[in-house]
Image: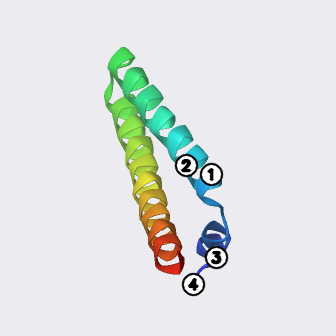
Amino acid sequence: MERAEEAMSELSLSEIEQRIAVVRQNINDLIEQAAAYSGGADEDRNADRIAEQEQELARLLKLREALLSDISRNS
């Protein structure tokens, strides 16, 4: 496991939920910025940033599901 993944696995459910909310807001902000700006370089940069945030969101959602699964198994 990578160091970043190890650190993420030690987060509480509340911390994961907060990070999910932040990433979702980042995605919304980036989409708004993309709509406001046009031009090849800007569009490519925004698309890359949105893709990065979507990957982070997917990782956090997966981590949350694993944590919730562990919690329900241990209850």
Position of residue 50 measured from the top left corner of the image (x, y, whole percent): 40, 42
Labelled pair 2, 1 in contact (Cβ < 8 Å): yes
In the visual, does 27 lie left or right of 2? left
Instruction: Please tell me whether mark 4 sits on a helix, a strand or a loop.
Output: loop
Q: Which sits in the foreground, 6 or 72? A: 72
- Residue 46 sits in quarter: top left
Tag in front: 4 or 1: 1
Q: How packed is label 2: few (under 14 Cα within 10 Å), some, or many (20 or more)?
A: some
Q: Residue at x 62, y 51 (%)?
A: 14
Q: CA separation, marks 2 and 3?
A: 17 Å
Q: Kindly report the distance in space between the C-alpha atoms of the residues bearing marks 4 and 3.
A: 6 Å
Kindly identify which residue carries mark 3: 6
Q: Kindly report the distance in space between the C-alpha atoms of the residues bearing marks 2 and 1.
A: 5 Å
Q: As shown in the figure, which amino acid type bears the numbered disc 2?
A: Glu
Q: Residue lying farthest bottom?
A: 1
The local secondary structure at tag 2 comes to helix
Report how far apart the C-alphas of labels 4 and 1 lie in the structure: 22 Å
Q: Residue at x 48, y 66 (%)?
A: 68
Residue 41 position within the rendered picture, expressed as x and y whole percent measured from the top left: 38, 33
Read off the residue under disc 2.
17
Give the crowd class for mark 3: few <14, some 14-19, many >=20 residues within 10 Å.
few
Tell me which amino acid carries mark 3. Answer: Glu
How far apart in space, not on screen, are marks 4 and 2 (Cα)?
22 Å
**Label 1, label 3: how many angstroms apart (C-alpha)?**
17 Å
> Image check: 33 left or right of 17?
left
> Reading the chain from its start, which is encountered first: label 4 or label 2?
4
What mark, if any, has residue 1 been given in the picture?
Answer: 4
Q: Which residue is mark 1?
A: 14
